[in-house]
């Protein structure tokens, strides 16, 4: 025992493998442990009284005493899980109940985190969910060369009613301009979703919300036809149900002209019928029963749009008592050159229609020289009228 103590006094203290591993792999800063061998008494049962008298190695002492003062490095900003990692978006929502419109004003974005370094060219894309994504898709202009773009642009959804506010959600995405990047289907820089049921009609509400990553949904097993395909798909299209769109009609019985003025103002959120995701819509009017060309009218065609604006008016002559017994059939079609036109949706106005359609028709014929405007949802099945 004395010989071993003498040897240990003449040489630097030996550090066992257990002590070395315990010091090196211990996570984070550690405190100096002079009697670390106490954790392994079966290896060093004789060093309990000899090691405390040994002076530590001069080269090791500064490192051991400075370790508790070191602070762990902060997590890199790009790998942070905080909600602000993708930036924030400032915008304002206004539900104009008097005009059945939803106004979304995109102000600015801050702290965007593009996938590649350097400046980015971004725009804001909006969708109403659930619904056909193409039909409800609106976007701002592109602001180039900055990670803090300022748009100050208002996107308007026409035909937005109180029923829509109670069940729909607005999705806003900050995207890179597809014309200025190689990857055409790259995911957006960030997105957010705002339930619209809490909006107060005719009162603007401002938001400053953190962007999130695009939500991915599990692909149904029926779609996994090939091995190696992605098990997830982008939540781009929500369940649209049977929505075919809606149309804004104005009715006015003119006492001076002695007839009914029917105005086709605009359509909103029409179902896409063409391969490019859009339609070439036009509207047909038919007053039943009636004969002759004066019972049928057609608007002009609006190319490649799902939210067309017509602002065209047509006239049906006749006393109000006679018109009250008739039915006005309004149908929206997709124009196809060389083939039959595709039916998008229709609406029937009469005294037997029921609901708002009946109310709109009867209230118009009950007044004179009073223009009434109302949005009507389109039915997906063509109406069959008997002679």
Image (spheres, helix red, strand yellow):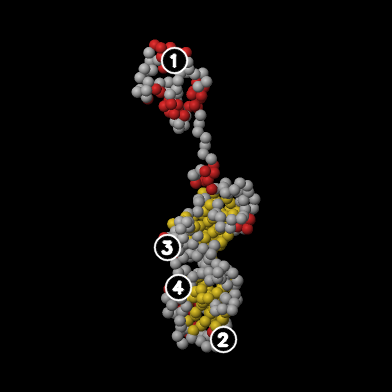
Q: In the image, residue 99 lies at what x, y percent?
A: 53, 66
**Which is nearer the eye, 260 or 16?**
16
Task: Please say whether residue 11 is visible from this viewpoint.
Answer: yes
Residue appearing at x 51%, y 43% in the figure: 80
Q: Which mark is residue 8?
A: 1
Q: Which residue is mark 2?
A: 293
Q: Mark 4 or mark 1: which is in front?
A: 1
Q: Nearer the viewer, residue 178 or 253?
A: 178
- Label 2: few (<14), some or many (≥20) within 10 Å? few
Against 203, residue 99 (above or below) is below
Q: Secondary structure at mark 1?
A: helix
- Between disc 3 and disc 2, whose residue precedes? 3
Q: Is residue 266 left or right of residue 43?
A: right
* Residue at left offset 46%, top offset 65%: 240
Label 2 vs label 1: CA separation? 117 Å
| Chain-order first, disc 4 or disc 1 | 1
Task: Give the spatial CA distance, label 4 vs label 2.
Answer: 28 Å
Residue linked to disc 4 = 356
Q: Nearer the viewer, mark 3 or mark 2?
A: 3
The crowding category of the residue bearing disc 4, from other C-alpha atoms within 10 Å (few below 14, some 14 to 19, many at least 20), is few
Task: Determine the secondary structure under disc 3.
Answer: helix
- Extreme-front residue of the structure: 3
Residue on which disc 3 sits:
222
């Amino acid at each position: 025992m004395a010989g071993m103590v003498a040897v240990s006094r003449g040489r630097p203290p030996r550090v066992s493998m257990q002590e070395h591993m315990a010091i090196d792999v211990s996570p984070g800063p550690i405190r100096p442990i002079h009697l670390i061998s106490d954790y392994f008494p079966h290896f060093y049962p004789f060093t309990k009284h000899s090691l405390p008298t040994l002076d530590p190695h001069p080269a090791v002492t500064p490192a051991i005493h400075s370790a508790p003062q070191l602070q762990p490095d902060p997590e890199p900003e790009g790998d942070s899980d905080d909600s602000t990692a993708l930036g924030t978006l400032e915008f304002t929502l206004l539900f104009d109940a008097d005009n059945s419109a939803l106004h979304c004003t995109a102000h600015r974005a801050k702290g965007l985190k593009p996938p590649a370094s350097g400046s980015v060219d971004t725009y804001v894309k909006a969708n109403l969910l659930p619904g056909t994504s193409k039909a409800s898709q609106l976007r701002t202009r592109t602001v180039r060369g900055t990670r803090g773009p300022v748009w100050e642009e208002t996107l308007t959804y026409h035909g937005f009613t109180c029923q829509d506010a109670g069940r729909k959600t607005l999705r806003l995405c900050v995207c890179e301009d597809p014309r200025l990047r190689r990857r055409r289907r790259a995911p957006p820089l960030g997105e957010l979703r705002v339930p619209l049921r809490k909006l107060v009609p005719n009162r603007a509400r401002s938001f400053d919300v953190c962007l999130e990553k695009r939500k991915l949904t599990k692909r149904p097993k029926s779609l996994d036809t090939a091995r190696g395909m992605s098990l997830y798909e982008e939540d781009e299209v929500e369940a649209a149900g049977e929505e075919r769109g809606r149309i804004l009609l104005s009715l006015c019985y003119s006492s001076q002209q002695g007839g009914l003025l029917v105005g086709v103002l605009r359509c909103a959120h029409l179902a896409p019928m063409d391969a490019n995701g859009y339609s070439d819509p036009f509207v047909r009017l038919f007053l039943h029963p009636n004969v002759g060309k004066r019972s049928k009218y057609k608007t002009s065609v609006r190319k490649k749009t799902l939210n067309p604006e017509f602002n065209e008016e047509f006239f049906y002559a006749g006393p109000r008592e006679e018109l009250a017994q008739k039915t006005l059939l309004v149908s929206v079609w997709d124009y196809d050159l060389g083939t039959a036109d595709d039916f998008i949706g229709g609406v029937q106005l009469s005294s037997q229609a029921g609901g708002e359609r009946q109310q709109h028709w009867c209230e118009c014929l009950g007044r004179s020289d009073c223009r009434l405007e109302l949005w009507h949802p389109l039915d997906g099945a063509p109406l069959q009228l008997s002679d």
